[in-house]
Every structure is written in structure tokens, then in C-alpha cells.
């Protein structure tokens, strides 16, 4: 029987054996879970309500403080206190306090491997599909259940196969690619389905670029978004792929609910326009729109190659008058690397405000929220009403290159 990637991963980790089909409901053994600071009080409450006396495996549980750091509201510290007490009580050693954004840390710190099944209390947990893992977001009740049992039931998703061949234009990044795909699929076009990426363009992408694609797949409703493990995956994860991991590539005659093919050369720089992620337009159609702020960061686009791409454009230039450029590295490690290679120096000299690694402006908690009538070009993953301030803030989502160009011009410009 032929299988897609998600069918292989779930089959190998389920209570029904290797062969599973879309629509089946199966129980899976969980390899890793991630809880972030926003949800930890609610997870703890449900865990206690369910009567559990211990965590099924403290070493497979990761607690990350990223959304509420540094604290911007008095109640934020309650989340830290409850999280610290829970971790100490049940012997959790994998606790990250201000080390970076949860989705960056989960792969960067080696918590996720190809073929793993991972759940997290954040919708963008789909990110780990970049290394060939089935990862998806869940609520705090489901997380409490996993903490007590190490298992969760799921429905096997159908899969959409997306093939991209060719070489991307120099002014196009993976952010442009995934935004264009979301625009084609629509915000609900992949609901509870797996996206599976194929083609020569995909093979050439760095792991960082693949992270962006997997991260934003949820904006089309996808349950997960998978890249087959390859040598880039092995190098990034610091492992040698096992035969089972190498076999995670979909079978040639696997069955898909839909197949979409793109030619890389056809992609152009695009933006998601206010206030929906699937409201996609070429940047060339938006030229001249005045902006007040540019945000470079988040779990979507705050990695070293992203910061370097922006720095290459900003080198020797200055951010436009009355425009704020806020830069937030995705992790402490990336921050340190960007300092070491001069990227941060270039950004600061151009006029950027560099913040501590965390979610910050992306979730509208800290670091540059805006007010009525203001406009921001941002590299994060959502532009919903009220996401970065009031409901009357206009949010345009773009790639780091496009964002940097806009920061210098003080308006939307096309590369």
C-alpha cells in the first residue's frame, strides 16, 4: 500500500500499525510536547483537574517563555510563577526563559527529529515539518491529557501535494512563495489537511526557508506541512539519518486529495494586505503606500539568513525619517551570531531598534504596538485586525528583503 509522508509518520507511531488511511482516527505515541508561557497556567489547571500525579516523561516536555517576556502586564508574572512551580514539582529540566521563540528553539535546540510526532500549545507548531516531523498545535486540555498519558488521538489528514520546480528570482524568498500558495488555497483551503512539498526548488531551500513555509501553512488551515528529510535536514539536526527517516519520502503512487504545481520563475514579491493572510497582491501593485513602521522578526522570519538579507539592503543606508524599524532575532543564539558577523551592527547603524529575542510585536504584547491610522510592513505570519495594536492599524506581511527596502523608502516599494 502506498503512503504519503503524514501517513507513514502516523502509521509508525500509532496503535494500529504502519498502514493508516485518511479519515481514520488513531491514537499516537507522542515524541515531544511544547508548552509556552501563555498557556501554562491553563495546562496546569486541567492537569490537576484530571487527577494526574506525574508527567508521563518530563524529559519529553519543553516549557518556553517567549510571548510574555519581558513582562508587559502585571498578570504576566503569574504565568512565570505557575510555570516554574510546575516544572520544579514534576522534574522538568527543558525550560527556556527568554532564550527565544518557541518554534525556533524546538528545532534549534534539537528537540525535534525527522519522523517525530510533536504537539505544542501554539498554532504555528506546524513549523517543525521543516525537518520532516508531524507537528501541530493543540489546546490546553489536550496538552494536559498528553502530559498525563503520553498519547493523543488524531484523525489522519488527507494530503495536498505541492510541487515547485526551477530557480526562484533573486528578489523572491520562501515568504513570497508561501504567501502566494496561501492566496491560491485561501485561508480555509487546506483545513485539517497536510501540505507536502516537492520539487527542485524545495530541494534547494535552506532549512530556515523551509521553516517559513511550514510555519505559515496553518494560515491556509493546514494540520501540518512536511518536507522530506535530506542531507540538509541531517546537518541542521546534527544527526545521521536512519533508514526509517530516509524512507519518510512519500511513495510515488501515493494518493493525494489535490496536486498543485508551480514554476519557480513565475513567483514575484508579494504582500498579504490588510487584514487577511490570504489577501495577496504583488508588491508592484502597492507601490507608494506610506508606512510608519517595519518589523523584522518572529518565528516566521527572524533567523540569521533573514537578518543578513535585510542588512545587505540596509548597509550604508538609513531608515527613512519618522519610520521605526524594529528587529527581533528569533533566538538568543541567532542574536549572538548576528552580533558576531556584524549583521546587528549594520542594522543598528541604519537606524534599527533591536529587541531581545521573543514574540514581542508579532503577538502585540511588547515592542512597538501601533495606533489608529498607522501602517506597518512586517515579516511575521498574521495581519489580523488588532494584531499589532488597535483594530485600525494596517498590517502588510512581506519578506525581509521587501521589508528592508520599504524601511529605507518610507513607503512600499518593489524590488
Image (cartoon, rainbow, N blue to C red):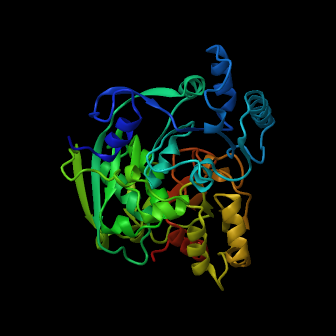
The number of discs equals: 0
Horizontal side of 88 relative to 158 (left or right) equals right
Direction bottom: furthest residue: 316
In the picture provided, is 184 more to the left or to the right than 392?
left
For residue 342, above or below residue 38: below
Q: In which quarter of the image is the C terminus?
A: bottom left
Q: Quadrant of residue 145?
A: top right
Task: Name the outermost residue toward the front.
Answer: 243
Pinpoint residue 48: horizontal percent, then vertical percent: 67, 17
Q: Give how far across and how far down residue 202 sits, in percent.
A: 36, 64
**Which residue shows up at 74% across the image and 58% down it?**
356
The residue lying toward the viewer, choosing from 90 and 197, is 90
Q: Quadrant of the N terminus?
A: top left
Question: 342 left or right of 214?
Answer: right
Residue 73 location (% of width, % of height): 78, 39
Image vertical order of residue 163 relative to residue 383, above or below: below
Percent x, y for residue 393? Answer: 58, 51
Residue most extreme to the left: 253
Relative to 128, residue 223 above or below: above
**Is 272 in front, or is 87?**
87
Q: Is residue 77 above or below residue 310?
A: above
Dividing the picture into quarters, in which one does residue 294 lie?
bottom right
Image position of 136 (left or right of 16):
right
User: Residue at 28% of width from left, 60% of height from top?
Assistant: 163
Tell me if residue 191 can be seen.
Answer: no
Would you identify the image quadrant in which residue 94 lies?
top right
Whether residue 57 appears in this view of the structure is yes
Q: Which residue is drawn at 29% across and 64% down?
A: 199
Which of 208 and 181 lies nearest the eye of the viewer? 208
Amino acid at each position: 500500500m502506498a503512503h504519503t509522508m503524514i501517513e507513514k509518520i502516523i502509521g509508525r507511531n500509532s496503535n494500529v500499525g504502519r498502514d493508516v488511511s485518511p479519515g481514520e482516527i488513531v491514537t499516537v505515541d507522542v515524541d515531544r510536547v511544547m508548552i509556552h508561557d501563555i498557556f501554562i497556567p491553563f495546562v496546569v489547571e486541567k492537569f490537576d483537574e484530571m487527577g494526574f500525579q506525574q508527567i508521563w516523561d518530563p524529559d519529553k516536555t519543553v516549557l518556553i517563555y517567549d510571548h510574555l517576556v519581558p513582562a508587559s502586564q502585571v498578570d504576566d508574572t503569574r504565568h512565570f510563577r505557575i510555570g516554574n512551580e510546575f516544572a520544579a514539582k514534576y522534574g522538568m529540566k527543558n525550560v527556556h526563559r527568554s532564550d527565544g521563540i518557541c518554534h525556533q528553539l524546538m528545532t534549534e535546540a534539537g528537540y525535534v527529529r525527522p519522523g517525530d510526532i510533536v504537539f505544542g500549545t501554539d498554532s504555528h507548531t506546524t513549523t517543525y515539518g521543516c525537518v520532516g516531523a508531524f507537528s501541530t498545535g493543540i489546546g490546553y486540555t489536550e496538552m494536559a491529557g498528553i502530559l498525563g498519558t503520553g498519547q493523543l488521538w488524531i484523525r489522519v489528514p488527507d494530503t495536498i501535494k505541492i510541487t515547485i520546480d526551477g530557480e526562484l528570482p533573486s528578489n523572491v524568498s520562501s515568504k513570497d512563495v508561501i504567501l502566494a500558495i496561501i492566496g491560491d488555497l485561501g485561508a480555509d483551503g487546506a483545513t485539517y489537511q497536510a501540505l507536502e512539498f516537492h520539487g527542485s526548488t524545495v530541494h534547494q531551500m535552506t532549512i530556515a526557508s523551509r521553516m517559513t513555509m511550514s510555519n505559515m501553512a496553518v494560515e491556509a488551515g493546514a494540520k501540518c506541512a512536511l518536507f522530506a528529510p535530506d542531507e540538509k535536514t541531517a546537518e541542521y539536526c546534527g544527526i545521521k539519518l536512519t533508514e526509517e527517516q530516509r524512507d519518510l519520502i512519500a511513495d510515488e503512487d501515493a494518493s493525494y486529495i489535490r496536486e498543485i504545481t508551480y514554476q519557480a520563475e513565475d513567483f514575484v514579491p508579494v504582500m498579504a494586505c490588510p487584514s487577511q493572510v490570504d489577501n495577496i497582491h504583488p508588491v508592484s501593485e502597492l507601490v507608494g503606500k506610506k508606512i510608519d513602521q517595519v518589523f523584522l522578526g518572529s518565528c516566521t522570519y527572524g533567523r540569521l539568513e533573514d537578518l543578513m538579507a535585510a542588512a545587505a539592503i540596509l548597509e550604508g543606508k538609513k531608515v527613512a525619517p519618522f519610520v521605526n524599524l524594529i528587529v527581533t532575532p528569533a533566538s538568543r543564539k541567532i542574536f549572538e551570531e548576528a552580533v558576531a558577523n556584524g549583521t546587528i551592527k549594520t542594522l543598528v547603524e541604519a537606524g534599527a531598534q533591536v529587541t531581545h529575542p521573543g514574540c514581542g510585536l508579532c503577538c502585540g504584547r511588547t515592542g512597538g504596538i501601533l495606533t489608529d491610522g498607522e501602517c506597518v510592513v512586517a515579516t511575521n505570519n498574521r495581519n489580523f485586525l488588532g494584531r499589532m495594536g488597535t483594530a485600525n492599524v494596517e498590517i502588510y506581511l512581506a519578506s525581509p528583503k521587501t521589508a528592508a527596502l520599504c524601511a529605507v523608502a518610507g513607503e512600499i516599494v518593489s524590488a
